[in-house]
Image (cartoon, helix red, strand yellow):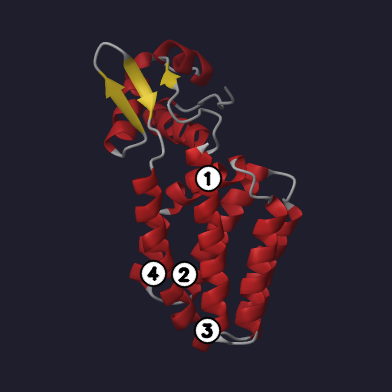
């Protein structure tokens, strides 16, 4: 289990929460796994009290569940979870494209392309690619200048990354992810709303089908 030691006492609970959630999202701790408080406490280098508080927060947010007389388990990803998140993604990211394209200039296009280059440069690291994928879409939302839309997408980012790792588990390639983002950028550079929407939806739909394949397997 790859968890970082926590250094500052006043942040024990918050950092334990972040480390465990990161491990869940990256599949270092897989869906359905039982969590041992003793093992987590030793790995993180903290006492049980802040750890319990961190696990309580994770349970409230739906990342883990406590089963009486059995223990605490990482939640399984369900088809309904994935469907709900991707329904929101499709609707919100189409709106991002509609709002963004009239605002595009050479400077913003250069910034978007810089984000894309980061993605290409990290193709060897699956978790990093998934993180950068989410950051790319979040950045487009930020550039759309709709603060509430940006916040809506930001609120779903952790689940984007968790599900994205599930897509890679099913065989979706890192190269495929970068190619799909390249198509989105080409459409943005053309200022073609219809083509950009199509490229975004193709990327989302391909990822959605890969995740479903992982769940079925």
Tag nearer the camera, 3 or 2: 3
Tell me residue 209's x, y (percent): 52, 53
The residue indicated by pointer 4 is 91
71 left or right, relative to 12: left
The residue indicated by pointer 1 is 213
Identify the secondary structure beneath mark 4: helix
41 and 71: which is toward the camera: 71
Identify the secondary structure beneath mark 3: helix
Query: How far is the residue under mark 1 from the one under mark 2?
Result: 28 Å
216 left or right, relative to 188: left
Could you say which disc has been placed on residue 194 in the image?
3
Question: Which comes sooner in the sequence, label 2 or label 4?
Answer: 4
Q: Is residue 210 above or below residue 202?
A: above
Could you say which disc has been placed on residue 141 in the image?
2
Identify the secondary structure beneath mark 2: helix
81 and 191: which is toward the camera: 81
Q: Is residue 28 above or below residue 85?
A: above
Question: Which comes sooner in the sequence, label 1 or label 2?
Answer: 2
Q: Is residue 3 above or below residue 121?
A: above
Tell me residue 187's x, y (percent): 62, 80
Tag nearer the camera, 3 or 1: 1
């Amino acid at each position: 289990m790859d968890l970082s030691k926590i250094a500052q006492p006043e942040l024990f609970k918050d950092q334990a929460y972040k480390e465990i959630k990161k491990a869940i999202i990256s599949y270092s701790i897989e869906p359905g796994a039982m969590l041992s408080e003793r093992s987590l406490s030793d790995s993180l280098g903290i006492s049980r009290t802040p750890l319990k508080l961190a696990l309580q927060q994770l349970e409230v947010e739906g990342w883990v569940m406590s089963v009486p007389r059995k223990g605490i388990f990482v939640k399984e990803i369900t088809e309904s979870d994935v469907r709900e998140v991707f329904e929101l993604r499709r609707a919100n990211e189409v709106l991002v494209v509609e709002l963004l394209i009239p605002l595009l200039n050479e400077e913003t296009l250069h910034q978007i392309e810089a984000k894309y280059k980061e993605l290409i440069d990290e193709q060897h690291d699956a978790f990093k690619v998934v993180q950068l994928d989410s950051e790319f879409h979040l950045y487009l939302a930020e550039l759309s200048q709709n603060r509430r839309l940006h916040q809506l997408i930001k609120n779903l980012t952790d689940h984007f990354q968790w599900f994205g790792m599930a897509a890679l588990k099913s065989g979706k390639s890192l190269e495929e992810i970068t190619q799909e983002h390249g198509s989105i950028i080409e459409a943005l550079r053309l200022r073609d709303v219809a083509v950009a929407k199509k490229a975004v939806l193709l990327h989302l739909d391909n990822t959605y089908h890969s995740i479903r394949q992982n769940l079925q397997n």
